[in-house]
Amino acid sequence: MAVTRARRTASGGSEPYGPRSEDPKQNVGWIKGVLRVKAGGWIKGACGVKASGWLKDADASGAVEVLAGTLLFVVFYYQAAPAKMAAWLTPTNRPGLGPWLGQAGSFGAGLLLLVIVPVLWWTVGRRRSPTELGFRVGDWRFGLAAAVVGAFLLTPLLFVNAGNPAFQSTYPLVRAAGASVSAFIVWELIYLGYYIAWEGFFRGLLLIGLKDRMGLWPAMVLQTVLSTVAHFHRPEPETLAALVAGLGFGWLALRTRSIWYVVLLHWYVGAATDLFCLLRGF
């Protein structure tokens, strides 16, 4: 008769891997069997099943992209800081170019780390189109109209804020931009690169790129919180405004299915702030 893995005991119950013996050496196999069955089943239930269910619910690929994007932003923030870029790029015989080259180099690094690298991952790694991140024309009629209306409504607030000493001491980021009209125009064209990098990352990658996997509101809140935190080194009113702007810009990006109208409006806000700070500083 074949020996079964569970045998009846004297009390009528059953024990896996046979009954315990009076000999301690023979109990080793029994103990191993019990631990393997009970502990193994518990581990599978507590870790394997729950973990696999969590991964299915949360979509691990989206979580990995958020973490990778955060790492890229940290590298941009510290390693591509304007002062560091100025030290690397400024010729020793042209120190006056330092502020210009520092900001331009920082914006260029932002485009590389926050836009080009994520888009390459999106197209090569995930085999998806960059248009799915908002790099497309989208609803241009609504987008242009919303940008114009938004600029009109924000202009008085920007003018008032420009009188704040905190804004006066911060903007424009290159003080020499106020030396002439041509210098101002050149600076604002350079400044455009910053807004493309910013909106491509926050409203493109983190919002449009994640909303289908994370859910609309989780993605909206995520990009709003992170973009607000990224303003901590700016004047306090601007940081508070970034909380509201994150929601508004996010809505506009989703409504138009494009980042470009948010870039346009955000660029206007930056250029108008620079202009009003210069005008009110004289």
Image (cartoon, grey):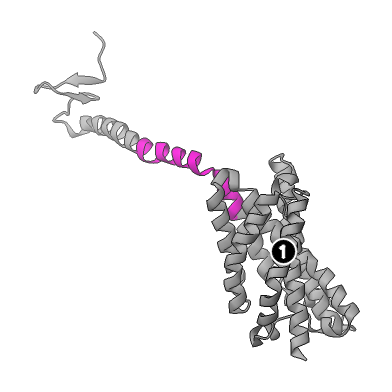
Task: Measuring from the top left, give residue 7's x and y in whole percent.
Answer: 19, 19
- Viewer-proximal residue, 12 or 174? 174
Is residue 179 left or right of 199 when viewed as pictured? right
Residue 252: image quadrant is bottom right
| Quadrant assignment for the N terminus | top left
Task: Measuring from the top left, give residue 172's x and y in whole percent.
Answer: 76, 80
Bounds of the magenta segment: 43-67
- Viewer-proximal residue, 247 or 214? 247
Q: Is residue 61 visible?
A: no
50 versus 108 height, above or below: above
Q: Does the segment drawn in magenta span residue 74?
A: no
Which residue is outermost to the top?
Answer: 1
Query: Which residue is tagged 1?
Result: 149
Q: Residues within 10 Å of mark 1 (few under 14, many from 20)?
A: few
205 versus 161 height, above or below: above
Residue 247: image quadrant is bottom right
* Residue beneath the point at 65% across and 62% down: 73
- Viewer-proximal residue, 29 or 185? 185
* Residue beneath the point at 76% across and 78% down: 274
* Residue beneath the point at 66% across and 50% down: 255
Q: Amino acid at mark 1?
A: Val
| Quadrant assignment for the C terminus | bottom right
* Residue beneath the point at 83% across and 81% down: 177
Q: Is residue 5 visible?
A: yes
Give the dominant element type of the magenta stretch: helix, strand or loop.
helix
- Viewer-proximal residue, 128 or 45? 128
* SS at mark 1 in the image: helix
Task: Measuring from the top left, give residue 46's x and y in whole percent.
Answer: 36, 40
149 versus 24 height, above or below: below
Task: Measuring from the top left, give residue 128's x and y in whole percent.
Answer: 71, 40
